[in-house]
Protein backbone atom coordinates (compact mmCIF):
# COMPACT_ATOMS: atom_id res chain seq x y z
CA UNK A 1 0.00 0.00 0.00
CA UNK A 2 2.83 2.41 0.91
CA UNK A 3 4.64 1.55 -2.32
CA UNK A 4 1.43 2.15 -4.26
CA UNK A 5 1.03 5.58 -2.63
CA UNK A 6 4.66 6.48 -3.41
CA UNK A 7 4.12 5.27 -6.98
CA UNK A 8 0.98 7.42 -7.26
CA UNK A 9 2.94 10.47 -6.07
CA UNK A 10 5.60 9.78 -8.70
CA UNK A 11 2.96 9.34 -11.42
CA UNK A 12 1.21 12.58 -10.35
CA UNK A 13 4.55 14.38 -10.72
CA UNK A 14 4.78 13.11 -14.30
CA UNK A 15 7.16 10.16 -13.69
CA UNK A 16 6.57 6.77 -15.28
CA UNK A 17 5.86 3.76 -13.07
CA UNK A 18 6.13 0.07 -13.87
CA UNK A 19 3.92 -1.72 -11.38
CA UNK A 20 5.38 -4.94 -10.05
CA UNK A 21 3.79 -4.51 -6.63
CA UNK A 22 0.18 -5.18 -7.56
CA UNK A 23 -1.54 -8.22 -6.12
CA UNK A 24 -4.45 -8.34 -8.52
CA UNK A 25 -5.17 -9.14 -12.15
CA UNK A 26 -5.20 -6.14 -14.48
CA UNK A 27 -7.79 -7.84 -16.68
CA UNK A 28 -11.51 -7.04 -16.20
CA UNK A 29 -14.12 -9.60 -15.20
CA UNK A 30 -14.78 -12.08 -18.02
CA UNK A 31 -17.28 -10.97 -20.65
CA UNK A 32 -19.94 -13.50 -19.57
CA UNK A 33 -19.90 -11.97 -16.08
CA UNK A 34 -20.19 -8.45 -17.44
CA UNK A 35 -23.17 -9.45 -19.60
CA UNK A 36 -24.86 -11.17 -16.65
CA UNK A 37 -24.27 -8.10 -14.48
CA UNK A 38 -25.81 -5.78 -17.10
CA UNK A 39 -28.85 -8.05 -17.32
CA UNK A 40 -29.20 -8.25 -13.53
CA UNK A 41 -29.05 -4.46 -13.24
CA UNK A 42 -32.12 -4.29 -15.46
CA UNK A 43 -34.00 -7.29 -14.10
CA UNK A 44 -33.28 -7.62 -10.42
CA UNK A 45 -34.21 -5.56 -7.41
CA UNK A 46 -30.76 -6.25 -5.96
CA UNK A 47 -31.95 -6.55 -2.39
CA UNK A 48 -30.26 -8.59 0.32
CA UNK A 49 -29.89 -12.31 -0.29
CA UNK A 50 -29.69 -15.27 2.06
CA UNK A 51 -26.65 -14.91 4.34
CA UNK A 52 -24.91 -17.92 2.76
CA UNK A 53 -25.61 -16.68 -0.77
CA UNK A 54 -28.15 -17.37 -3.50
CA UNK A 55 -28.87 -21.07 -4.04
CA UNK A 56 -28.03 -20.90 -7.78
CA UNK A 57 -24.50 -19.71 -7.04
CA UNK A 58 -23.96 -22.21 -4.23
CA UNK A 59 -25.11 -24.97 -6.61
CA UNK A 60 -22.84 -23.70 -9.38
CA UNK A 61 -19.84 -23.66 -7.04
CA UNK A 62 -20.64 -27.22 -5.94
CA UNK A 63 -20.77 -28.21 -9.63
CA UNK A 64 -17.36 -26.54 -10.16
CA UNK A 65 -15.85 -29.00 -7.66
CA UNK A 66 -17.28 -31.89 -9.62
CA UNK A 67 -16.15 -30.51 -13.00
CA UNK A 68 -12.75 -29.25 -11.96
CA UNK A 69 -11.59 -31.70 -9.29
CA UNK A 70 -14.00 -34.63 -9.57
CA UNK A 71 -15.04 -34.05 -5.97
CA UNK A 72 -18.57 -34.17 -4.63
CA UNK A 73 -19.21 -31.12 -2.46
CA UNK A 74 -22.84 -30.62 -1.45
CA UNK A 75 -24.10 -27.08 -2.08
CA UNK A 76 -25.28 -27.04 1.53
CA UNK A 77 -21.62 -26.89 2.63
CA UNK A 78 -20.83 -23.91 0.37
CA UNK A 79 -21.05 -20.43 1.85
CA UNK A 80 -20.74 -17.43 -0.48
CA UNK A 81 -18.72 -14.66 1.18
CA UNK A 82 -17.44 -11.12 0.79
CA UNK A 83 -14.21 -12.21 -0.87
CA UNK A 84 -11.76 -14.64 0.68
CA UNK A 85 -11.19 -11.90 3.26
CA UNK A 86 -14.78 -12.07 4.51
CA UNK A 87 -14.65 -15.85 4.37
CA UNK A 88 -11.52 -15.94 6.46
CA UNK A 89 -13.00 -13.69 9.16
CA UNK A 90 -16.07 -15.95 9.35
CA UNK A 91 -13.88 -19.05 9.50
CA UNK A 92 -11.66 -17.67 12.24
CA UNK A 93 -14.68 -16.65 14.33
CA UNK A 94 -16.58 -19.89 13.81
CA UNK A 95 -13.69 -22.34 14.15
CA UNK A 96 -11.52 -20.90 16.92
CA UNK A 97 -11.97 -19.61 20.45
CA UNK A 98 -10.03 -16.56 21.64
CA UNK A 99 -6.48 -17.54 22.52
CA UNK A 100 -6.42 -20.47 20.09
CA UNK A 101 -3.02 -21.08 18.50
CA UNK A 102 -3.17 -20.91 14.73
CA UNK A 103 -0.16 -21.67 12.53
CA UNK A 104 0.51 -19.38 9.57
CA UNK A 105 3.47 -19.73 7.24
CA UNK A 106 6.25 -17.16 7.30
CA UNK A 107 6.51 -15.78 4.69
CA UNK A 108 2.76 -15.66 4.17
CA UNK A 109 -0.16 -13.41 3.36
CA UNK A 110 0.00 -10.61 5.95
CA UNK A 111 -3.76 -9.98 6.32
CA UNK A 112 -4.21 -13.47 7.74
CA UNK A 113 -1.77 -12.70 10.54
CA UNK A 114 -3.45 -9.37 11.14
CA UNK A 115 -7.00 -10.76 11.13
CA UNK A 116 -6.10 -13.57 13.53
CA UNK A 117 -4.32 -11.11 15.81
CA UNK A 118 -7.27 -8.70 15.75
CA UNK A 119 -9.54 -11.57 16.82
CA UNK A 120 -7.30 -12.38 19.81
CA UNK A 121 -6.00 -15.59 18.35
CA UNK A 122 -2.37 -16.48 18.76
CA UNK A 123 -0.50 -16.43 15.46
CA UNK A 124 2.16 -19.14 15.41
CA UNK A 125 4.68 -18.56 12.60
CA UNK A 126 5.65 -21.68 10.66
CA UNK A 127 8.90 -20.87 8.93
CA UNK A 128 9.15 -22.08 5.34
CA UNK A 129 12.34 -21.63 3.37
CA UNK A 130 14.59 -23.24 0.80
CA UNK A 131 15.24 -26.18 3.14
CA UNK A 132 11.51 -27.06 3.07
CA UNK A 133 11.05 -25.98 -0.58
CA UNK A 134 9.07 -23.03 0.84
CA UNK A 135 6.16 -25.22 1.97
CA UNK A 136 5.18 -26.31 5.48
CA UNK A 137 6.40 -29.82 6.32
CA UNK A 138 5.25 -32.11 9.17
CA UNK A 139 8.64 -31.53 10.84
CA UNK A 140 8.19 -27.77 10.82
CA UNK A 141 4.63 -28.20 12.11
CA UNK A 142 5.87 -30.46 14.92
CA UNK A 143 8.35 -27.76 15.91
CA UNK A 144 5.55 -25.20 16.30
CA UNK A 145 4.18 -26.76 19.49
CA UNK A 146 0.49 -27.57 19.98
CA UNK A 147 -1.80 -25.94 17.40
CA UNK A 148 -5.57 -25.52 17.21
CA UNK A 149 -5.53 -24.46 13.59
CA UNK A 150 -3.31 -24.16 10.54
CA UNK A 151 -3.64 -21.90 7.51
CA UNK A 152 -1.96 -23.02 4.29
CA UNK A 153 -2.10 -21.41 0.87
CA UNK A 154 -1.07 -23.34 -2.24
CA UNK A 155 -0.16 -21.54 -4.47
CA UNK A 156 1.07 -19.17 -1.80
CA UNK A 157 1.31 -15.42 -1.65
CA UNK A 158 4.08 -14.14 -1.71
CA UNK A 159 6.08 -17.12 -3.00
CA UNK A 160 3.78 -18.68 -5.59
CA UNK A 161 5.02 -22.04 -4.30
CA UNK A 162 2.62 -25.00 -4.28
CA UNK A 163 2.48 -28.10 -2.11
CA UNK A 164 2.73 -31.22 -4.26
CA UNK A 165 -0.26 -33.58 -3.86
CA UNK A 166 1.90 -35.77 -1.63
CA UNK A 167 3.05 -32.84 0.52
CA UNK A 168 -0.55 -31.67 0.78
CA UNK A 169 -1.67 -35.12 1.91
CA UNK A 170 1.08 -35.14 4.54
CA UNK A 171 -0.14 -31.81 5.94
CA UNK A 172 -3.74 -33.06 5.99
CA UNK A 173 -2.69 -36.28 7.73
CA UNK A 174 -0.71 -34.25 10.28
CA UNK A 175 -3.75 -32.06 11.04
CA UNK A 176 -6.10 -35.03 11.13
CA UNK A 177 -3.96 -36.92 13.65
CA UNK A 178 -3.77 -33.94 15.99
CA UNK A 179 -7.30 -32.66 15.49
CA UNK A 180 -5.95 -29.38 14.10
CA UNK A 181 -8.45 -27.40 12.03
CA UNK A 182 -6.96 -26.94 8.56
CA UNK A 183 -7.86 -23.79 6.65
CA UNK A 184 -6.82 -24.14 3.03
CA UNK A 185 -6.60 -20.87 1.13
CA UNK A 186 -7.11 -21.87 -2.52
CA UNK A 187 -7.50 -18.35 -3.88
CA UNK A 188 -4.74 -18.84 -6.49
CA UNK A 189 -6.13 -22.09 -7.85
CA UNK A 190 -6.46 -21.85 -11.62
CA UNK A 191 -3.23 -19.86 -11.88
CA UNK A 192 -0.49 -22.48 -11.98
CA UNK A 193 2.07 -23.59 -14.51
CA UNK A 194 2.04 -27.33 -14.75
CA UNK A 195 1.95 -28.34 -11.09
CA UNK A 196 -1.13 -30.24 -9.90
CA UNK A 197 -3.60 -28.26 -7.80
CA UNK A 198 -4.94 -30.09 -4.77
CA UNK A 199 -8.12 -29.01 -3.04
CA UNK A 200 -8.49 -29.84 0.63
CA UNK A 201 -12.15 -30.54 -0.18
CA UNK A 202 -11.00 -33.76 -1.87
CA UNK A 203 -9.02 -34.94 1.14
CA UNK A 204 -10.83 -34.06 4.32
CA UNK A 205 -14.40 -32.97 5.04
CA UNK A 206 -13.23 -31.32 8.28
CA UNK A 207 -10.98 -28.84 6.44
CA UNK A 208 -12.23 -25.37 5.57
CA UNK A 209 -11.56 -24.26 1.99
CA UNK A 210 -11.30 -20.50 1.43
CA UNK A 211 -11.81 -19.42 -2.17
CA UNK A 212 -12.39 -16.24 -4.13
CA UNK A 213 -13.43 -14.73 -7.43
CA UNK A 214 -10.55 -12.26 -7.09
CA UNK A 215 -7.65 -13.97 -8.84
CA UNK A 216 -8.33 -16.63 -11.50
CA UNK A 217 -11.82 -15.22 -12.09
CA UNK A 218 -10.37 -11.70 -12.34
CA UNK A 219 -13.07 -10.05 -10.20
CA UNK A 220 -11.24 -8.39 -7.28
CA UNK A 221 -13.54 -5.39 -6.84
CA UNK A 222 -16.68 -7.50 -7.01
CA UNK A 223 -15.85 -8.65 -3.48
CA UNK A 224 -16.99 -12.21 -3.86
CA UNK A 225 -15.60 -15.47 -2.52
CA UNK A 226 -16.73 -18.70 -0.97
CA UNK A 227 -16.04 -21.28 1.71
CA UNK A 228 -16.40 -25.03 1.63
CA UNK A 229 -17.25 -25.82 5.23
CA UNK A 230 -17.33 -28.88 7.46
CA UNK A 231 -20.96 -29.72 8.23
CA UNK A 232 -20.74 -28.53 11.84
CA UNK A 233 -19.48 -25.07 10.87
CA UNK A 234 -22.26 -24.28 8.37
CA UNK A 235 -24.79 -23.06 10.90
CA UNK A 236 -22.28 -21.02 12.98
CA UNK A 237 -20.96 -19.39 9.80
CA UNK A 238 -24.50 -18.65 8.63
CA UNK A 239 -25.36 -16.94 11.92
CA UNK A 240 -22.12 -14.95 11.95
CA UNK A 241 -22.52 -13.98 8.27
CA UNK A 242 -26.08 -12.82 8.84
CA UNK A 243 -24.98 -10.58 11.70
CA UNK A 244 -21.68 -9.31 10.32
CA UNK A 245 -22.42 -8.83 6.62
CA UNK A 246 -26.16 -9.63 6.10
CA UNK A 247 -25.27 -11.01 2.68
CA UNK A 248 -22.54 -10.96 0.05
CA UNK A 249 -23.00 -8.37 -2.76
CA UNK A 250 -26.09 -9.35 -4.73
CA UNK A 251 -25.06 -8.05 -8.15
CA UNK A 252 -21.76 -9.88 -7.87
CA UNK A 253 -23.50 -13.11 -6.90
CA UNK A 254 -25.92 -12.96 -9.82
CA UNK A 255 -23.12 -12.21 -12.26
CA UNK A 256 -20.60 -14.55 -10.63
CA UNK A 257 -22.57 -17.63 -11.69
CA UNK A 258 -21.45 -16.95 -15.27
CA UNK A 259 -17.77 -16.88 -14.31
CA UNK A 260 -17.57 -20.68 -14.27
CA UNK A 261 -18.51 -20.78 -17.96
CA UNK A 262 -15.77 -18.34 -18.97
CA UNK A 263 -12.88 -20.75 -18.58
CA UNK A 264 -11.44 -20.17 -22.07
CA UNK A 265 -11.13 -16.44 -21.48
CA UNK A 266 -9.71 -16.98 -18.00
CA UNK A 267 -7.20 -19.56 -19.18
CA UNK A 268 -6.04 -17.08 -21.83
CA UNK A 269 -5.19 -14.72 -18.94
CA UNK A 270 -3.19 -17.52 -17.33
CA UNK A 271 -1.30 -18.12 -20.59
CA UNK A 272 -0.24 -14.46 -20.49
CA UNK A 273 0.90 -14.83 -16.87
CA UNK A 274 2.96 -17.80 -17.92
CA UNK A 275 4.81 -15.74 -20.54
CA UNK A 276 5.42 -12.94 -18.02
CA UNK A 277 6.62 -15.41 -15.42
CA UNK A 278 9.35 -16.55 -17.82
CA UNK A 279 10.29 -12.93 -18.53
CA UNK A 280 10.60 -12.16 -14.81
CA UNK A 281 12.55 -15.32 -13.96
CA UNK A 282 14.95 -14.73 -16.88
CA UNK A 283 15.21 -11.00 -16.19
CA UNK A 284 15.93 -11.46 -12.50
CA UNK A 285 18.53 -14.14 -13.28
CA UNK A 286 20.22 -11.70 -15.68
CA UNK A 287 20.24 -9.14 -12.89
CA UNK A 288 21.97 -11.70 -10.65
CA UNK A 289 18.81 -12.18 -8.59
CA UNK A 290 18.56 -15.92 -8.98
CA UNK A 291 17.74 -17.20 -5.50
CA UNK A 292 13.96 -17.42 -5.83
CA UNK A 293 11.22 -19.52 -4.26
CA UNK A 294 9.70 -22.12 -6.64
CA UNK A 295 7.26 -19.98 -8.67
CA UNK A 296 4.75 -22.78 -9.28
CA UNK A 297 1.65 -20.62 -9.44
CA UNK A 298 -0.05 -17.28 -8.68
CA UNK A 299 1.63 -14.27 -10.35
CA UNK A 300 4.54 -13.68 -8.01
CA UNK A 301 8.24 -14.32 -7.84
CA UNK A 302 9.71 -14.07 -4.33
CA UNK A 303 13.39 -13.34 -4.69
CA UNK A 304 16.28 -13.01 -2.30
CA UNK A 305 17.96 -9.63 -2.65
CA UNK A 306 20.14 -9.26 0.43
CA UNK A 307 23.31 -9.35 -1.68
CA UNK A 308 22.07 -6.01 -3.06
CA UNK A 309 20.86 -4.44 0.18
CA UNK A 310 17.85 -4.13 2.46
CA UNK A 311 14.56 -4.98 0.70
CA UNK A 312 12.64 -1.86 1.76
CA UNK A 313 15.55 0.42 0.84
CA UNK A 314 15.97 -1.33 -2.51
CA UNK A 315 12.26 -0.97 -3.31
CA UNK A 316 12.41 2.74 -2.51
CA UNK A 317 15.51 3.18 -4.67
CA UNK A 318 14.02 1.19 -7.55
CA UNK A 319 10.98 3.42 -7.50
CA UNK A 320 13.02 6.64 -7.32
CA UNK A 321 15.72 5.64 -9.77
CA UNK A 322 14.04 3.18 -12.14
CA UNK A 323 10.32 3.83 -11.80
CA UNK A 324 9.74 0.20 -10.69
CA UNK A 325 7.52 -0.72 -7.77
CA UNK A 326 7.90 -4.03 -5.97
CA UNK A 327 6.93 -5.22 -2.49
CA UNK A 328 9.52 -5.69 0.26
CA UNK A 329 9.31 -9.09 1.93
CA UNK A 330 8.81 -7.45 5.34
CA UNK A 331 5.12 -7.28 4.41
CA UNK A 332 4.97 -11.07 4.46
CA UNK A 333 7.62 -12.00 6.96
CA UNK A 334 8.53 -9.67 9.83
CA UNK A 335 11.71 -11.61 10.64
CA UNK A 336 13.37 -12.58 7.38
CA UNK A 337 11.46 -10.44 4.89
CA UNK A 338 14.10 -7.70 4.79
CA UNK A 339 16.13 -10.07 2.62
CA UNK A 340 13.37 -10.67 0.06
CA UNK A 341 11.26 -8.83 -2.51
CA UNK A 342 8.02 -9.95 -4.13
CA UNK A 343 7.79 -9.17 -7.83
CA UNK A 344 4.29 -9.43 -9.25
CA UNK A 345 3.79 -10.09 -12.95
CA UNK A 346 0.10 -9.39 -13.23
CA UNK A 347 0.75 -6.18 -15.20
CA UNK A 348 0.99 -5.95 -19.03
CA UNK A 349 3.79 -7.97 -20.62
CA UNK A 350 5.62 -4.95 -22.10
CA UNK A 351 5.70 -3.26 -18.66
CA UNK A 352 7.06 -6.38 -17.00
CA UNK A 353 9.69 -6.77 -19.72
CA UNK A 354 10.75 -3.12 -19.50
CA UNK A 355 11.03 -3.39 -15.70
CA UNK A 356 13.36 -6.37 -16.07
CA UNK A 357 15.49 -4.47 -18.63
CA UNK A 358 15.84 -1.53 -16.26
CA UNK A 359 16.65 -3.77 -13.31
CA UNK A 360 19.39 -5.72 -15.05
CA UNK A 361 20.99 -2.61 -16.48
CA UNK A 362 20.89 -1.03 -12.99
CA UNK A 363 22.66 -4.05 -11.52
CA UNK A 364 25.01 -4.09 -14.53
CA UNK A 365 25.94 -0.44 -13.93
CA UNK A 366 26.99 -1.37 -10.39
CA UNK A 367 23.67 -0.25 -8.86
CA UNK A 368 24.21 3.45 -9.54
C1 LIG B 1 -3.35 -15.48 -0.26
C2 LIG B 1 -4.49 -14.51 -0.28
N1 LIG B 1 -5.61 -14.83 0.41
C3 LIG B 1 -6.66 -14.00 0.42
C4 LIG B 1 -6.64 -12.77 -0.24
C5 LIG B 1 -7.86 -11.88 -0.15
O1 LIG B 1 -8.58 -11.92 -1.33
P1 LIG B 1 -10.07 -11.40 -1.54
O2 LIG B 1 -9.97 -10.33 -2.61
O3 LIG B 1 -10.85 -12.56 -2.06
O4 LIG B 1 -10.60 -10.88 -0.27
C6 LIG B 1 -5.51 -12.42 -0.98
C7 LIG B 1 -5.46 -11.14 -1.70
O5 LIG B 1 -4.48 -10.75 -2.27
C8 LIG B 1 -4.42 -13.32 -1.00
O6 LIG B 1 -3.29 -13.04 -1.68
Image (cartoon, rainbow, N blue to C red):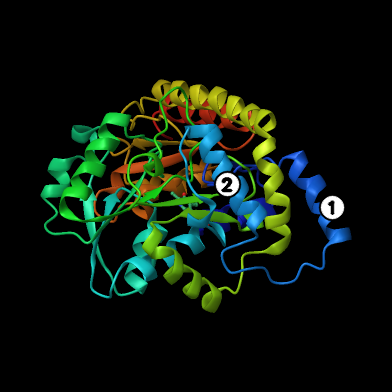
Horizontal relation, residue 293 to residue 216: left or right: left
Element assignment for label 2: helix
Labelled disc at residue 38: 1
What residue is shown at x 44% (from left), y 64% (from top)? Answer: 234
Within the image, what quadrant is residue 102 found in?
bottom left
Question: Total number of numbered labels?
Answer: 2
Per the model, the C-alpha gap separating discs 2 and 1 is: 21 Å
Within the image, what quadrant is residue 273 found in?
top right
* First in sequence: mark 2 vs mark 1: 1
Labelled disc at residue 61: 2
Labelled disc at residue 91: none
Asked whether the beta carbons under mark 2 and mark 1 sit within 8 Å of each other, the answer is no
Along the viewing direction, whichever of 100 and 302 lies nearer the viewer: 100
Q: Position of residue 198 (x, y in %)?
A: 39, 35
Q: Quadrant of the C terminus?
A: top left
Residue lying farthest to the right in this orientation:
42
Residue lying farthest to the bottom in this orientation:
243
Horizontal relation, residue 184 to residue 357: left or right: left
What residue is shown at x 30% (from left), y 75% (from top)? Answer: 120
Along the viewing direction, whichever of 56 and 111 lies nearer the viewer: 56
Q: Nearer the viewer, mark 2 or mark 1?
A: 2
Q: Position of residue 143 (x, y in %)?
A: 10, 50
Element assignment for label 1: helix
Q: Is mark 2 within 8 Å of ligand 1?
A: no
Horizontal relation, residue 155 to residue 14: left or right: left
Amino acid sequence: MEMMKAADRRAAAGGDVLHLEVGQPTTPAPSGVLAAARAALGDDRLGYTAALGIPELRERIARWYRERYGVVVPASRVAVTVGASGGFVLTALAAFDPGARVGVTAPGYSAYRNILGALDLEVVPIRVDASTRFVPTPERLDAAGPLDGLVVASPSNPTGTMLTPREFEAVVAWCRRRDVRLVSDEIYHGISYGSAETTAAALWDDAVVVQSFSKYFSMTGWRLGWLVLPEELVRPVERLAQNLFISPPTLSQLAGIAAFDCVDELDANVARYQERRRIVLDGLAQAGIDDVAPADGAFYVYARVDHLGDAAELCTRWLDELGITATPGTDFDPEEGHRWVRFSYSEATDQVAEAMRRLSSWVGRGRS
